[in-house]
C-alpha cells in the first residue's frame, strides 16, 4: 500500500525536445517544407510514428510505407547523434534533489516514457541504475493518453495506481495519468496542463515539503 513515483523523460528529466525538433525539422526541410516551434509542441509525448504522420500532414506530403520507414530511421539516427553528446549536465535543475530525497526515504520510482531511446539516454546522463523500473516505448503497445505505460510502471513498483504520482510535461501524459487514476503533476505551462492535479514551471519550483505532502496524502 506504499506510494510510488513515476517520471516522464523528455521534458521532465531532460530537455531532449530540442534535439527531436532539430532532427524532425531537418527531415521536413529535406522534403521541401518547414514547421514552427509552436507546431513542435504538438509532438511532445507523441510516439515516433505518430510524430512523422503529423509532420507529413503539415507539409502536405504523402510517403510510401517504405519511404516512411526510411525517413523515420534517418530521423532517429540524426536524433541519436545529439543524444550521443549528452552527459549528466543535461539533467534538468531540481531533478537530482527530488531523486535523492526519494532514495533516502526508500520510496520506489520508475521511468514512464514514450521514447524507444529512453534507456540509451538514461545511461548517457548516468541515471540508468537509479530507477527501480524503466518502462519505455519498447514496452508498450498503446501510446499516451492511454495509461498503459504508467500502469505497467505501477505494477513493476508493486504499487496501486491510486498511490502513484506521475510527473509529466505533455497534455497526453497528464491525461494518461488521470485515466490511470494516479496523481498527475504537470511540469510546464499551467494553461496548457490545466488537467493536471498540480502544475509547476519546472523542478526547481518543487519543494521537498510538497513531496512530503504527497506522501502523506491517503489517496488522490
Ligand atoms: C518522447 C518525446 C516525443 C518523442 C517520443 C518518442 O516522449 O516527448 O517527442 O516523439 O518520446 O521518442 P523516440 O523517437 O526516441 O522513440 P516522453 O514520453 O519521454 O516525453
Ligand atoms: Mg515528455
Image (spheres, rainbow, N blue to C red):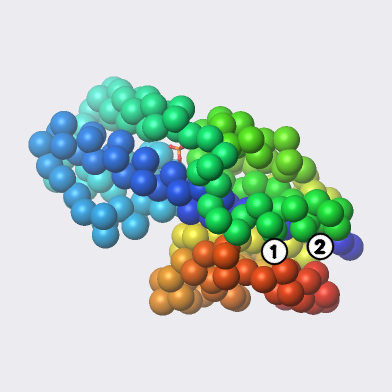
Count how many numbered circles sit on residues in the image. Answer: 2
Q: In what element is the residue under mark 2?
A: loop
Residue 26 x, y percent position in the rendering: 22, 35
Instruction: Tell me which residue sits at (54%, 73%) in the image.
Output: 199
Instruction: Tell me which residue sits at (73%, 41%) in the image.
Output: 130
Q: Is residue 63 left or right of residue 128?
A: left
Instruction: Tell me which residue sits at (47%, 60%) in the image.
Output: 170
Q: Nearer the viewer, residue 202 or 1?
A: 202
Where residue 163 sits, quadrant-wise, is bottom right
Q: Nearer the viewer, residue 170 or 49?
A: 170
Asked if residue 74 is positioned above or below residue 61 in the image, the reply reads above
Most extreme residue toward the left is 32
Location of mark 1 (residue): 165
Q: Is residue 191 left or right of residue 6?
A: left
Asked if residue 216 is positioned above or below residue 43 in the image, the reply reads below
> Mark 2 Cα within 10 Å, few/some/many (few <14, many 20+)?
many
Which circle's residue, 2 or 1, is located before the other in the chain?
A: 2
> Mark 1 Cα within 10 Å, few/some/many (few <14, many 20+)?
many
Instruction: Give how far apart the Cα atoms at labels 2 and 1 are.
Output: 8 Å
Disc 1 Cβ-to-ligand 2 distance below 8 Å: no
> Is the C terminus in the top left, top right, bottom left or bottom right quadrant?
bottom right
Mark yes or no: residue 138 visible.
no
Location of mark 2 (residue): 3
Q: Is residue 26 left or right of residue 163?
A: left
Instruction: Tell me which residue sits at (44%, 44%) in the image.
Output: 16
Amino acid at each position: 500500500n506504499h506510494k510510488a513515483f513515476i517520471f516522464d523523460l523528455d521534458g521532465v528529466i531532460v530537455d531532449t525536445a530540442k534535439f527531436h525538433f532539430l532532427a524532425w525539422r531537418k527531415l521536413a526541410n529535406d522534403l521541401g517544407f518547414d514547421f514552427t516551434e509552436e507546431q513542435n509542441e504538438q509532438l511532445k509525448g507523441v510516439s515516433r510514428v505518430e510524430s512523422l504522420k503529423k509532420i507529413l500532414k503539415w507539409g502536405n506530403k504523402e510517403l510510401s510505407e517504405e519511404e516512411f520507414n526510411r525517413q523515420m530511421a534517418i530521423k532517429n539516427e540524426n536524433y541519436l547523434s545529439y543524444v550521443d553528446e549528452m552527459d549528466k549536465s543535461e539533467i534538468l535543475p531540481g531533478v537530482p534533489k527530488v531523486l535523492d530525497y526519494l532514495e533516502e526515504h526508500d520510496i520506489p520510482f520508475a521511468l514512464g516514457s514514450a521514447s524507444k531511446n529512453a534507456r540509451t539516454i538514461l545511461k548517457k546522463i548516468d541515471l540508468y541504475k537509479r530507477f527501480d523500473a524503466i518502462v519505455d516505448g519498447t514496452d508498450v503497445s498503446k501510446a499516451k493518453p492511454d495509461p498503459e505505460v504508467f500502469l505497467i510502471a505501477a505494477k513493476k513498483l508493486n504499487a496501486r495506481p491510486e498511490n502513484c504520482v506521475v510527473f509529466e510535461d505533455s497534455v497526453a501524459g497528464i491525461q494518461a495519468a488521470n485515466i490511470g487514476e494516479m496523481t498527475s503533476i504537470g511540469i510546464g505551462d499551467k494553461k496548457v496542463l490545466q488537467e493536471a492535479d498540480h502544475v509547476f514551471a519546472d523542478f526547481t519550483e518543487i519543494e521537498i515539503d510538497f513531496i512530503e505532502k504527497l506522501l502523506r496524502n491517503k489517496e488522490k
